[in-house]
Amino acid sequence: MKSDEELLRSFKLYIGEDDIAYLEFLGAQDVPENNIRQAELIRDGLTKLLEESPERDYNMLIDLTATSVVTNIPDRSKEIYAKSPVFKKMYKIAVVTPSLLLKILTSAVSLIGGKYEGIKSFDNREEALGWLKPGK
């Protein structure tokens, strides 16, 4: 299993100048234990990031472009994302992925998490940002 330090370098999490929360995956985690731990680190990092403005709801862009080779995401990882209260705090979530499999998984996770109408998949970042921007 990879160390937390290695897994923390496998994604980038920040609030942009446009007040959108960004989660950019920088590579796939094919080993189930690594994938699960990465999901926990993302949940914890996002929770910490959002604690700075607890009264705000954010739009979020999740960029999965670099993970398009993933063929199996552990059920525990899906559960962490779907049931995490921090993701429910997001108003709209745009997921960027060219992979049909990841688009299907995004829909499944959004159904489990009860946010189906607030999550959409896009082929590119520009379309996703257009949907997320206020007034869109």
Image (tube, helix red, strand yellow):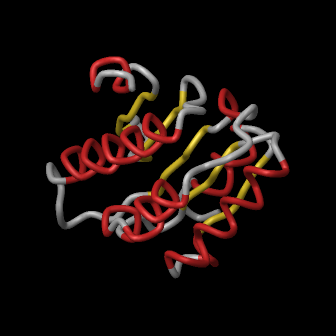
Number of numbered discs: 0
The N terminus is located in which quarter?
top left
Which residue is at a point 33% across and 50% down the rendered structure image? Answer: 43
Which residue is at a point 47% across and 39% down the rendered structure image? Answer: 23
Which residue is at a point 64% across and 50% down the rendered structure image? Answer: 95
- Could you say which is closer to the camera, residue 25 or residue 101? 101
| Up/down of 48 relative to 24, above or below | below
Occupied quadrant, residue 132: bottom right
| Up/down of 129 relative to 84, above or below | above
Instruction: Answer with left or right where residue 129 lies relative to residue 77.
Output: right
Hey, which residue is sitting farthest bottom in the picture?
Answer: 114
Which residue is at a point 77% across and 61% down the rendered structure image? Answer: 104
Occupied quadrant, residue 37: top left
- Could you say which is closer to the camera, residue 94 or residue 56? 94
Occupied quadrant, residue 14: top left
On the image, the x and y values in percent for residue 65 come to: 69, 32
The C terminus is located in which quarter?
bottom right
On the image, the x and y values in percent for residue 123 come to: 81, 43
On the image, the x and y values in percent for residue 79 come to: 46, 65
